[in-house]
Amino acid sequence: MSIMLPRIAKNCLKDGYTLIELLIVISIIALVFGVGTASYRNYQGRQLFEASVREILSDLRLAQEYALAGRSEGCSQFEGYVFESAQNGLNYSIYRRCGGNNVLYKNKSLPSGTTIQVRGNNNGDRNFRFNALGKGLDVTTAEACVTITRGLYTKYVKIDKVSGNIEVTTNPC
């Protein structure tokens, strides 16, 4: 026995999409969304890294400028400004050096996943000093080096011992 469908019902069955067609479209949308999200997260991480590099450069230039200007803030034996990274690499500090003592000027924590390493001397010091009134850097090497890292991204900041020139590079110091 065969069932005869009315002609109107047969036309209705031909309209619309099959389950396979819908699954293919949904899969393509999910794939595009997944790739877009991954690209955006990569972009966001790169921008966060670049912002950290800019902020560290700004603070280095600030310490250098204050040392050049002799900005002692009431210190009678002003020696300069010290830039130092913490041992864990998650933050850095700027100190005003007065009579052999460091007085904290600024302490900055880095965004999660970003680390900093400061090398001023060959003996493993994690700091260097911009000497007062343009007398260069207090380091035993030709330059101080600041390494900033976040995931796969790394930049190096080199500070020349004599001129104080600050240069950002991707080449290791």
Image: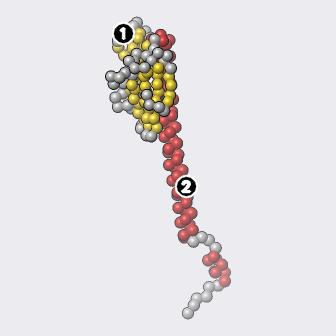
- Give the amino acid type for the residue marked by disc 1 in the picture: Gly
Secondary element under disc 1, as helix, strand or loop, is loop
Q: Image point 54% across, 62% down: which residue?
A: 26
Residue 81: where, in percent of width, then height? 43, 16
In the image, 110 versus 57, the foreground residue is: 57
Q: Of 73 and 160, which appears nearest the observer?
A: 160
Residue 3 visible in image: yes
Q: Amino acid at mark 2?
A: Val
Q: Residues within 10 Å of mark 1 (few under 14, many from 20)?
A: few
Split into 4 quadrants, where in the image is the C terminus? top left
Tell me whether the residue at label 2 lies in contact with that at label 1, contact meaning CB atoms closer than 8 angstroms: no
What residue do we see at 36% from left, 24% from top? 126
Q: Position of residue 143 (x, y in %)?
A: 43, 21
Could you tell me how far apart the alpha carbons at marks 2 and 1 are, in whole angstroms? 62 Å
User: 149 above or below 102?
Assistant: below
Q: Split into 4 quadrants, where in the image is the N terminus?
A: bottom right
Residue at label 1? Answer: 99
**Residue at x 50%, y 25% (from the top left corner):** 167
The residue positioned farthest toward the left in the image shown? 123
Residue visible at 41% across and 10% down? 78
Circle 2 residue: 32
